Amino acid sequence: MSKEEKILVANKVRRVGESDYDRLILRTHVVTEEDEILDVVSTYCKNFIKDEDDIIFLSEKMVACTQQRAIPMDSIKPRRLAKVLSHFVTKTSAGIGLGIPETMEMALQECGTPRILFAASASIVGKLFHKRGWFYIVAGEKARGIDGPCEYTLPPYNHYVVLLPESPDKVAREVAQKLKCKVAVIDANDLGINIIGVSDDTIEKELLCDILRDNPLGQEDECTPMGIIRKVG
């Protein structure tokens, strides 16, 4: 088996509107803070890029891990407020979110205590009107993007809290410049997808969400944190 055959896990074709899109799913090693994101993406993507209209899409978790934004659970010391607030968070099939003291503590650190308390208050009001999700709307993207440990997460990150990456647009631009194509950083799970960073304004975020709606990278232990989109018809 060639190197390219080991890296390319699948080509998951998806039709959006009147067009078909190849989605090349690429397997990597376990990316850590010891890695440089430019080197990682170049190593695994360079032989699959055909032209400047190809779009590399990167898992936000992989990018965050190279920025030392993956925090071991045992190094997080939740304050009492984090323990109290975490009990009121609704857990979903996509993960525990801020439903444990450690992830809530990181939300308090990332977003600030006043904002999280305001978000908690908004959540209470929302529930009175049978509206869900007001906490994350008020708390913002940084809170919404915090990933807690799950049993199906790739080790060692099943014992880590992972924050959103810093400056995702800048990361996307740097990768795009190196590989001469377009780049997006995505936050995806089985419930939805957010485009948190793009290399340039020509990338249509709404279209990209439709292309990736089924979360082709997966969210378990596939070790497939990146892929390439190519319009084929």
Image (tube, rainbow, N blue to C red):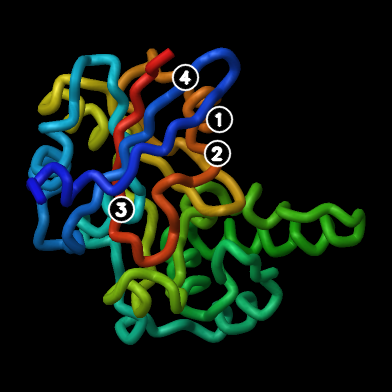
Q: Amino acid at mark 4?
A: Glu
Residue closest to the eye, 122 or 197? 197
Residue 213 is marked as 2
- N-terminal of the pair, mark 2 or mark 4, is 4
| Callout 1 crowding tier (Cα within 10 Å): few <14, some 14–19, many ≥20 | some
Left or right of 160 on screen, residue 43: left
Residue 204 is marked as 4
- N-terminal of the pair, mark 3 or mark 2, is 2
Measuring from the top left, give residue 22's x and y in whole percent. 38, 28
Q: Amino acid at mark 2?
A: Arg
- N-terminal of the pair, mark 1 or mark 4, is 4
Mark 1–mark 2 CB contact (< 8 Å): yes
Of badges 2 and 4, nearer the viewer stands: 2
Image-quadrant location for residue 100: bottom right
Image-quadrant location for residue 199: top left
**Residue 168 in view (yes/no):** no
- Report how far apart the C-alphas of labels 3 and 2 lie in the structure: 16 Å
Q: Residue at x 31, y 26 (%)?
A: 55
Left or right of 77 on screen, residue 69: left
Of badges 1 and 4, nearer the viewer stands: 1
Q: Amino acid at mark 1?
A: Asp
Residue 151 vertical position relative to residue 184 in the rendered view, above or below: below
